[in-house]
Amino acid sequence: MSRRLFSNSTNPNPKGSHKAFLVDTLDLVKSLESQGVAPNKAGAISVAIVEVISKSLETVSDKFVSTAEMDKNVKLQQTYMSAFKCELEASQERHFIKLKDENHNLQTYLEKMHTSLTDKIDHVIRLTM
């Protein structure tokens, strides 16, 4: 009874998790042997292919981000933006209240100045009459 062997390799990605892949090495070796490759060379080629696939997957995992990781980062950015928006709105509200108070104080000051000038003008007019 022939037994089917699979090469199982794992690639660590930058986050420390591993991605597994399977290669049917027995099928690969049989395929190479059927094309005239010697059994020992077919085995060596099979090992080389597994190593190439492993390195390729490692390179891909280093250069690309998974959908789950991207979704996680998008949600994190949305959270940061929401917090920033709330902080910005609170800051604008405080600034608006400060400007409103300053405007009220200036308006009160102008009214006092107007009253004072009106009183002084009236006083000068009475003195000149």
Image (cartoon, helix red, strand yellow):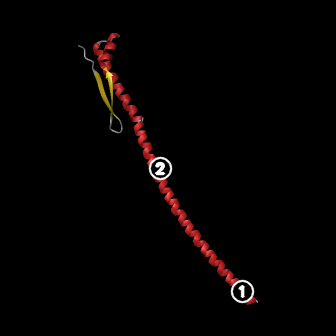
Q: Is residue 1 left or right of residue 29?
A: left
Secondary structure beneath dot 2 equals helix
- The amino acid beneath tag 2 is Met
Secondary structure beneath dot 1 equals helix
Residue 3 occupies quadrant: top left
Say which residue label 1 marks.
124
Answer above or below: position of 74 versus 88: above
Q: Residue at x 67, y 80 (%)?
A: 117
Answer above or below: position of 83 versus 127: above
Quadrant where the image shows the N terminus: top left
Q: Residue at x 60, y 72 (%)?
A: 106
Q: Is residue 112 left or right of residue 37?
A: right
Q: What is the x, y in percent for residue 26? A: 29, 17
Say which residue label 2 marks.
81
Q: Residue at x 63, y 75 (%)?
A: 110
Seen from the viewer's position, the closer of residues 36 and 124 is 124
Label 2: how many Cα within 10 Å (few below 14, some 14–19, many 20+):
few
- The amino acid beneath tag 1 is Val
Q: Are marks 2 and 1 in contact (CB under 8 Å)?
A: no
